[in-house]
Every structure is written in structure tokens, then in C-alpha cells.
Image (cartoon, rainbow, N blue to C red):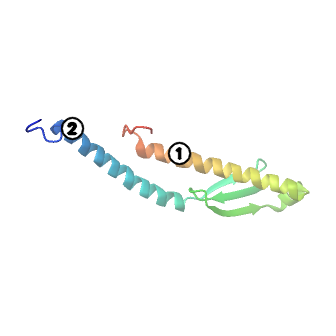
Amino acid sequence: MNKGKGFGFGLGKMKELTEAFKKAQQVQEGAKQLQEELEQMEIEGKSPDGLVKVILSGNQEPRGVEISPEALEKAGSAQALSAMVTAAMTDAYNKSTATMRDRMEELTSGLNLPGM
């Protein structure tokens, strides 16, 4: 039996566990704040010619689509207009996911979390 050894770790391990717990709480609080910020963001994506715009929140929730009159003239067909809208959606999605990734990296930087 290990008399007087408690759970098998000393004060050093207890300090590490306490620090890890504090870091986890900081990340949790930061993640909640980040979620709120992302909900308020508006990220705009455009078709390559800029004639179609798609607006998403930072959480990829659709906020709006703007199709200029020139886009209707240039497209000439529903299929071409659809391709322009899809390109704008893709641009907005890519910007939104990059924003989320960058913000999460900021949140977790310096924490030495496994897998991050």
C-alpha cells in the first residue's frame, strides 16, 4: 500500500491540473464570446465579376443575396445566373470558414492544447 501518497500525485501535478482547468475555462468563455461575435458578423462573397453578392453570418447562416441588373443582362440564362450565385456563395463560405478558423486559432494560441 502507498501510505500517505493520496491519489498517487503530488502538489506539482495538482498545480498542472489546476492550470489546465483554468485554461479550459478560458477557452470555453472565449468560445462563447466568439460564437456571439460570429452570429453578428456579415461576410460578403462575390461572383468573379462582382455582379452577384451573397451575405452570410460568421456561422454561415444566409443573410441575403444581391443580384445586380447587369448580372441579369450578362447571364442571359437561368443556368448562367445560377453559376454566378453559386460562385458568390462559395466565396462567402470560404471567407466565413477562414474567419472562423483564424478566430479559433487566436483563441487557442499559446494554450498548448493537444490536437489544436
**66 to the left or right of 6:** right
Nearer to us in this view, 46 or 35: 35
- Mark 2 belongs to which amino acid? Lys
**112 to the left or right of 45:** left
**20 to the left or right of 116:** left
**Residue drawn at (55%, 58%) of the image:** 41
Q: Which residue is mark 2?
A: 13
Measured as percent of width and height from the top left, residue 33 is found at 43, 57
**Residue drawn at (17%, 41%) of the image:** 7
Extreme-left residue of the structure = 4
Q: Which dot, 2 or 1, sits closer to the camera?
A: 2
Q: Is residue 87 above or below residue 8?
A: below
**63 to the left or right of 31:** right
* Marking on residue 84: none
**Residue drawn at (40%, 37%) of the image:** 114
Q: How many marks?
A: 2
Mark 1 lies on a secondary structure that is: helix
Measured as percent of width and height from the top left, residue 20 is found at 29, 43
Mark 2 packing: few (<14 Cα in 10 Å), some, or many (20+)? few
Query: Which circle's residue, 2 or 1, is located before the other in the chain?
Result: 2
Mark 1 packing: few (<14 Cα in 10 Å), some, or many (20+)? few
Measured as percent of width and height from the top left, residue 11 is found at 15, 39
- The answer to whether residue 46 shows anywhere in this view is no
Quadrant hosting residue 3: top left
Q: Which residue is mark 1?
A: 101
**Residue drawn at (58%, 48%) of the image:** 97
Mark 2 lies on a secondary structure that is: helix
Q: Can you say which quadrant of the picture contains the C terminus? A: top left
- Mark 1 belongs to which amino acid? Arg
